[in-house]
Amino acid sequence: IKKKGIKFVTRPSSGAHNIQGSIPLSLVVTHLLKYARTRKEEKKILNEGKIMINGKIRNYLLFSLGLMDAISVPSLHENYRLFYDQKGKFLLLPLTDNEKDIRIVQIKNKTIITQGKIQLNNSDGSNLVLDKADYHTGDSLVLSFQDGKIKEHLPLKKDSRIYILGGKKIGIIGTLEDIKENNIIVKTTQGNFETAKTYAYVIGQMNITEEK
């Protein structure tokens, strides 16, 4: 099975991320973190509870991870977030202390449920039920690992800082210059380009840099 240029010998389990957009925890430990070389070493590390995913200890080898998931190794004081590089391969980028306890999710859709409340369905599989309706599909939310509450709302609008998660410009960071129905114009230091609106992921002031 090939995913983003990596040949998988281990298939991730079903979870918050679809199979095409996910990587199993075992490959994160061996190929990205490079903490283990054998299955025995992988199991030892995970069974000792050394790896946290989005603020929770995970020890299942096939646990599914995807874009924007946070990986922490408290014993080594190391924290990373999962991205795609400009070739579409998974990439770990280090997190600052201010970012290790938050996750950024994208609103995939919203529905009205009982008593007029709004349910937001997010990119990581989570759901939020709110009284407010001033959130839109495509916006991003900064959520706390501790209580799951919204710390910041990042709307998809002109001048937003965005990360491109698909297409020929995957992995590029830029500023949303204009929205044209289903397409957007993105401004970067290398010039402007047009791409599908669905590829835009608002990241706000997240401390990440493009691959060189």
Image (cartoon, helix red, strand yellow):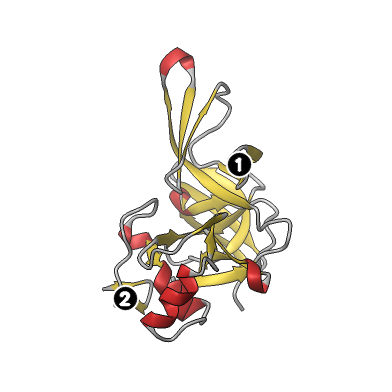
- Measure the alpha-carbon separation of dots 1 and 2: 37 Å
The image position of residue 147, as x and y in percent, is 61, 40
Residue bearing mark 1: 157
Seen from the viewer's position, the closer of residues 172 and 148 is 148
Judge by depth and name the residue closer to the eye, 203 or 190. Answer: 203
Residue farthest toward the top in the current orientation of the protein: 115
Residue 162's place in the image compared with 148, above or below, is: below
Position of the N terminus by quadrant: bottom left
Residue 11, relative to residue 165: is it above or below? below
Q: Which mark is residue 8?
A: 2
Q: Position of residue 116 (x, y in %)?
A: 47, 15
Q: Residue at x 56, y 32 (%)?
A: 135
Q: Nearer the viewer, residue 6 or 57?
A: 57
- Foreground label between 1 and 2: 2
Q: Assign a secondary structure to mark 1.
A: loop
Q: Residue flagged by tag 1: what amino acid is it?
A: Lys
From this viewpoint, is residue 136 visible?
A: yes
Query: At x 31% / y 60%, what residue is drawn?
Result: 13
Q: Label 2 neighbourhood size at 10 Å, few (<14), some (14-19), many (20+)?
A: some
Residue at screen point 34% across, 55% down: 18
Mark nearer the N terminus (1 vs 2): 2
